[in-house]
Structure formats: structure tokens, C-alpha cells
Amino acid sequence: MAHAPGDPHVLVLGGTTEARALAAALAEVAGLRATSSLAGRVAEPRLPAGEVRIGGFGGPDGLAAWLRAERVAAVVDATHPFAAVMSGNAAAAAAATGVPLLALRRPGWAPVPGDDWHPVASLADAAALLPALGRRVLLTSGRQGIAAFAHLDGLHFVARSVDPPEPPLPASLDVLLDRGPFTLDGERAVLREHRIDVVVTKDSGGAATAPKLTAARELGLPVVVVTRPPLPAGVPVAETVPAALAWLAARGLTPR
Ligand code: NAP
């Protein structure tokens, strides 16, 4: 929807399904300007509705300058739960400028009976644990996470990512270029066809990439789960897009 020069401006830090859903909702609001920001990591990103800018801001100071220059009234940090640098930058820039900040974070996954989960604090810890758990690994930690496993010569990796990964890479590696949402049947097939005996994932949460957890449970496979980095202190959190819209409505930015 077209916006006028004096309309309040909301910045959505994106890169997630929820960020796209929020952008779609905000694009329908009359009298509001909304901009989605993407890091530019993915060669052909799924673009959100409405105005989009791509690329880093230049740290917290660059983001603060952007918030001032673009007269931003509120920021919703809807980045991926593991995009901790950007979330920290958003908190610092919001504190420096006084612009209200909300984190939109889908809940993490929780194990259910039958799961054999091994929580670890980092990809490096996942790599240290892996040799004790299996030999053929499905790695779903994203293109940039694969380097943490490059030194594990004795294991075979099947790594799934949106774009091709870059070195350093494990010596024995098959790459599956794909992006979610994934189906349970599809995940069963991946585990079977590649004779996977252990899965590595971040605790991304959400439905789009959860079927691998069900498929692993069915086959009795261990799953190494990298737990989430903490959010910056003092930032309010909404778990759903409607809750984020309610937060914006409470600031008079969207209709109640
Ligand atoms: P990160 O490590 O937290 O951020 C590194 C730098 O990338 C930031 O300092 C910032 O650069 C830039 N950046 C990150 N998100 C941005 C955004 N939405 N708009 C503009 N600049 C952004 O981030 P990351 O983990 O590499 O993730 C990058 C993007 O991919 C995020 O948008 C995230 O939502 C998405 N994503 C990440 C994961 C994951 O597992 N980490 C998974 C799926 C999607 P400047 O300091 O120059 O501003």
C-alpha cells in the first residue's frame, strides 16, 4: 500500500518465515510505512511484501544512524533465533536512539517421548560430540555452519543448505541444495537414502523444518540440538506475528 511522507515507519529485521508474514500484514496497513531488511546471505531470497532493503547497516552505529535518518518509529527484530549479532546490534541501536524494539521469536522445539536429543551450546560442541554418536551425519545447521565440522575426517556428512557451502568443508560431503518447508515423507527418504545415523540441527523452532525431528524419532536416531543463544537483556519478546501486531497496535502503529 502506498504511504505518505509523514506516515510512521516500522523496520522489520527479517530473514525468517515470521518476518515475511509480518511484512505481509504491515503492507496492508493504511498510513504506515514498513521496511523489511535482509542481510543478503541468500543469492535468491524469498522477498517479503512491501519495501525491502538488503545488506548490513554497518554495526550498531550504522543501524542507529539508519533509524534516525529514516525516522523509524519501532523496530521488530524478526531475525532467526541464531542471528545473535544482529539482535545485539538491534538492542544497542534501539538503546542509543530510544526507538522501541520488539523481538519476534518463534518458540524453540521441545523433545517428546522417543526422542534421543543431545543438547549442546555451539556447533563446535556438536562437532566434538558427533564421533561418539554416529558415522553418517545429516547436517542442517545452514551453509555457514558446515565449517565447524570440516576437521572431522572419519565421518560422512550430508549437508543441506539453500546455497552451495564454501570451504573449509569436511572431506566426505554430499550437499543437498534445498530450502524448507520440508515434509515428513521427504525427511524419511533423506535419512533412509543416505543411511544417516545421526542428525545435527540448531533449535530453530517452527513447523517448516520440524519433520526431520519426527523422522529421526521414528528411526531411533540421535539428534544433536544446538541450543539458542540468549536474546539481549531487556528486549520484550513476541512469539507470534499476531502478538507482534498487538505490540505495534499498543504503540498506535497498527489498528487494534
Ligand atoms: P548475524 O551473525 O547475527 O549478523 C551478522 C551481520 O549480518 C550483522 O552484524 C549485520 O551486519 C548483518 N545482518 C544480519 N541480519 C541482517 C538483517 N536482517 N538485515 C541487515 N543486515 C543483517 O546474522 P546471521 O546469523 O549471519 O544471519 C543473517 C540473516 O540470515 C539474518 O537475517 C537471519 O534472520 C537469517 N537467517 C539466519 C539463520 C541462522 O541460522 N543464523 C538461519 C536462517 C536465516 P551489520 O553489522 O553490517 O549491520
Image (spheres, grey):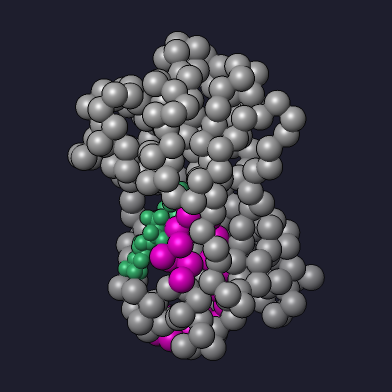
Q: x, y percentage for residue 215?
A: 60, 22
Q: x, y percentage for residue 208?
A: 59, 37
Residue 87 lies in the magenta-colored region: yes
Q: x, y percentage for residue 129?
A: 43, 37
Q: Does residue 207 appear to the left or right of 42 in the view shown?
A: right
The part of the image, by quadrant, that contains residue 159 is top left
Residue 234 shows up from this direction: yes
Tell me the residue at 46%/80% (across/down).
92
Q: Does residue 178 appear to the left or right of 30 in the view shown?
A: left
- Give the total number of marks visible in the rendering: 0
Q: x, y percentage for residue 184?
A: 61, 22
Image quadrant containing the C terminus: bottom right
Tell me the residue at 40%/20% (across/down).
136
Residue 176 shows up from this direction: no
Task: Name, please, the residue furthest toward the front.
Answer: 132
Task: Name, please, the residue furthest toward the right.
Answer: 256
Camera-side residue of 157 and 193: 157
Residue 64 lies in the magenta-colored region: no
Position of residue 189 relative to residue 74, above or below, is above
Camera-side residue of 240 and 8: 240
Position of residue 157 relative to residue 118, above or below, is above
Q: Does residue 132 appear to the left or right of 102 in the view shown?
A: left
Camera-side residue of 84 and 241: 84
Image quadrant containing the N terminus: bottom right
Quick check: which quadrant has ligand 1?
A: bottom left
Tell me the residue at 26%/36% (across/down).
150
Tell me the residue at 21%/40% (across/down).
168
Q: Which residues are magenta?
A: 68-88
Position of residue 45 relative to residue 152, above or below, is below
